[in-house]
Image: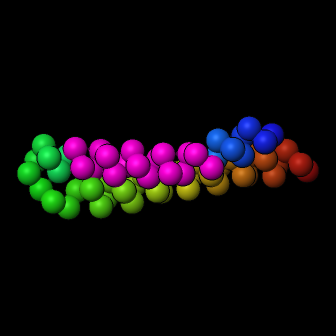
Amino acid sequence: MVGEYTSLAFMMPVSALLGYGLGYLLDKEFGTTWLYIPGLILGIAAGLVQLIRQLMRDTSDDR
């Protein structure tokens, strides 16, 4: 159980960094300067969705 929660602690920053990184790469590819922002937001949202899924799964097992 501790391992699952430790992975959640790493998942949030990793998903945000991946979103930022993909947005940065798209900025370089298309010559824009703003695509990193939606990438960062999508990365944060993906991390939060995964966090909520894990917490819902853990709380439903307790009942």
Tell me: 7 left or right of 12. right
* Residue 8 in view of the camera: yes
The residue at the point 74 percent across, 38 percent down is 3
Q: Residue at x 24, y 49 (%)?
A: 24
Q: 40 and 63: which one is in front? A: 40
Task: Return the residue found at the far right.
Answer: 63
Residue at position x 56%, y 45% from top? Answer: 11
> Where is residue 10, by image quadrant?
top right
Q: The N terminus lies in which quarter of the figure?
A: top right
From where the camera sits, is residue 46 visible? no
Q: Which residues are magenta?
A: 9-25
Q: Please name the colour scheme applied to the rendered image.
A: rainbow
Task: Tell me the residue at 69%/44% (across/down).
Answer: 6
49 on left or right of 15 = right
Please state the total of marks drawn on the protein image: 0
Comparing 51 with 25, the one in front is: 25
Q: Quadrant of residue 29?
A: top left
Asked whether, in this view, residue 19 is left or right of residue 4, the answer is left
Considering the whole magenta stretch, tell me its main secondary structure. helix
Q: Nearer the viewer, residue 18 or 38?
A: 18
The stretch drawn in magenta includes residue 1: no
Image location of residue 38, percent across then percent down: 31, 59
Q: Is residue 53 left or right of residue 22?
A: right
- What x and y, as percent, mark residue 58? 79, 47
Query: At which x and y percent is residue 61?
Result: 85, 44
Residue 56 placement (x, y as % from top left): 73, 52
